[in-house]
Image (cartoon, rainbow, N blue to C red):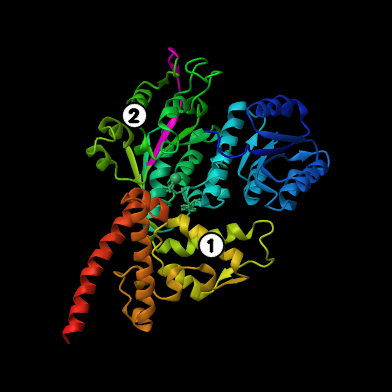
Amino acid sequence: MRESQLEPLRVLWVDDDAELTGGLVDYLAGEGYAVDCVHDLAAAARALEQASYDLVLVDLDLPDGSGFSLIRDTPRERAREFVVITGHGSVRTAVEALRHQVFDYLMKPVELAELCNLLARVGHARSVAAAGGGADPASGGGTSGTAAPAGTHASELLPGASAGMRQVQQLLSRAAGTDITVLLQGESGTGKEIAANCLHQLSNRRGGPFVAFNCGAVSPSLIASELFGHEKGSFTGALRTHKGIFERAEGGTLFLDEITEMPVDLQSSLLRVLETGTVTRVGGDRELPVNVRIVAATNREPMQYVEEGRFRLDLYYRLQVFPVALPPLRERPEDIDLLAAYFLAHFDSRPNSGTAEARSFSPAALECLRRHDWPGNVRELRNVVERACLLGGAKIEPEHLLLPERAVTTSAVSPDAPDAAAAAAKPGGGSLLRDAEQELILQTLNACGGNKTRAAAQLGISLKTLYNKLKRFESRDAGGAKDAGAAGAS
Ligand SMILES: Nc1ncnc2c1ncn2[C@@H]1O[C@H](COP(=O)(O)OP(=O)(O)OP(=O)(O)O)[C@@H](O)[C@H]1O
Ligand SMILES: [Mg+2]
């Protein structure tokens, strides 16, 4: 799960507990991470003046003050992510840490596996950002070892007031009381990972690790060893025994993302693990018992994959014991205001967000948000709000949202949305934008050799949305030809 193409993760560890850091820092350096270790705030500030870091691990009780002041005072470009490591965890400090948008919050003693898992996640978040996915501090981390305060409700962890989301919250709360396997389905950006994390936080496993594993992002040759671990010497390069994801999630929740992308031959191994509750490391012969709750997710239609022979039916049945479908944002417009306000508060409370007063959306901006059809779902909304925070002042106006509909109308991008009055207001602009969208989509599709999955990924929309749009273009072209014909005849 470690990045290899990018330069090593740069880590600054600020902790006066030399006993804790000593061995771990050496180990991490041996693993190829660039780790600097300092023991107080003053030294940390100096280090951050001289260099920037991908991750700052910070203790809260430092000889010259609280770690929170470092988080508050460090410009974001100097430290991509902060992780709090404390020996005196409390609900108050956990909440404070959340308010500071830390990536994760760990309790001492910190286990090596936990630390490796954390670094892998930070590395993943960095590579996602480098690939243009945008920094996503709140969702980038799981929350291994972070206990949600008792009594936390699903609606706090997974905000949403629509009937659809209330049902999701109820289902998750119900599943949380058991170890039942849950399958989350929903378009890209609807919140599957955050739902998985919510389930973990609501469950008795909340004190254990939450480990996310993307079955589509690991090369097929490595996936077995990543999932199940390997024994030293089991293949060239297996220099030491390696614990797999299942073992690292011991006592917690394992989130298997993009489950339908798992190679078929591994699907039977996975099924065996689910059925026997044991894993066997690659090159090993011992069956190691594992105590892990599985949450799987997909943004595809699994039955279609089954029909195509790419997904095993028996695994599908085993996983879909408790399916939970996350509705696309366009099907729950009631959530738009709420989520927009939620993200605004989130990005606004960041240090260095640029303004002192609390921001708000102008009525016109809210109207634009409500009209957009959100092909990228909640992720898109989050990105739009983050960008608006950079572009706008105390009042966020439509021009800060950079939504295509702003210049024209919703009906331009969603021709099937009934908005005749608005369309009539700007007849020409609508078709211009519409043409541009169609052009972009068809060009991308062309560049991807007709591969819709790749085109959708490149466009940042779900495959389903791409299909819908292509269907629209088809019917539009048919309609357009008719119009042209009528005009010519008259
Ligand atoms: N209900 C919600 N409340 C707050 N934030 C949300 C909600 N749903 C999604 N998000 C945010 O939207 C972004 C996308 O969510 P997430 O990564 O969970 O989506 P996903 O369904 O896993 O998408 P993909 O299929 O592309 O992996 C994240 O930043 C997440 O924090
Ligand atoms: Mg996801």
47 shown above or below 208: below
Q: How many marks?
A: 2
User: Which residue is more in the foreground, 43 or 278?
Assistant: 43
- Name the kind of residue labelled 1 in the image: Val
**Mark 1 Cβ inside 8 Å of ligand 1:** no
Crowd tier of the residue under label 2, counting other residues whose Cα lies within 10 Å: few below 14, some 14–19, many 20 or above: many
Task: Give the percent coordinates (x, y) of residue 130.
Answer: 55, 48
Mark number, residue 385:
1
Q: Which residue lies furthest to the bottom in this view?
A: 490
Secondary structure category for the residue under label 1: helix
Q: Judge whether residue 89 can be spotted in this image.
A: no
Q: Of 477 and 38, which appears nearest the observer? A: 477
In the rendered image of this protein, does residue 489 appear above or below residue 412? below
Badge number at residue 475: none
Q: Residues within 10 Å of mark 1 (few under 14, many from 20)?
A: many
Q: Distance between the residues labelled 2 and 1?
A: 39 Å
Q: Horizontal placement of 81 versus 463: left or right?
A: right
What x and y, as percent, mark residue 379? 47, 55
In this rendering, position of residue 312 left or right of residue 179 = left
Q: Which segment is the magenta one?
A: 284-297
The residue where tag 2 is placed is: 267
Q: What element carries label 2?
A: helix
Residue 428 position (above or below residue 129): below
Quadrant housing the C terminus: bottom left
Query: Does residue 292 belong to the magenta stretch?
Result: yes
Among numbered discs 2 and 1, the one appearing first in the sequence: 2
Is residue 318 a member of the stretch shown in magenta? no
- Tell me if 222 is positioned left or right of 164 in this view: right
Q: What residue type is labelled 2?
A: Gln
Residue in view at x 32 percent, y 26 percent: 268
Determine the residue positioned at 61% across, 44% down.
103
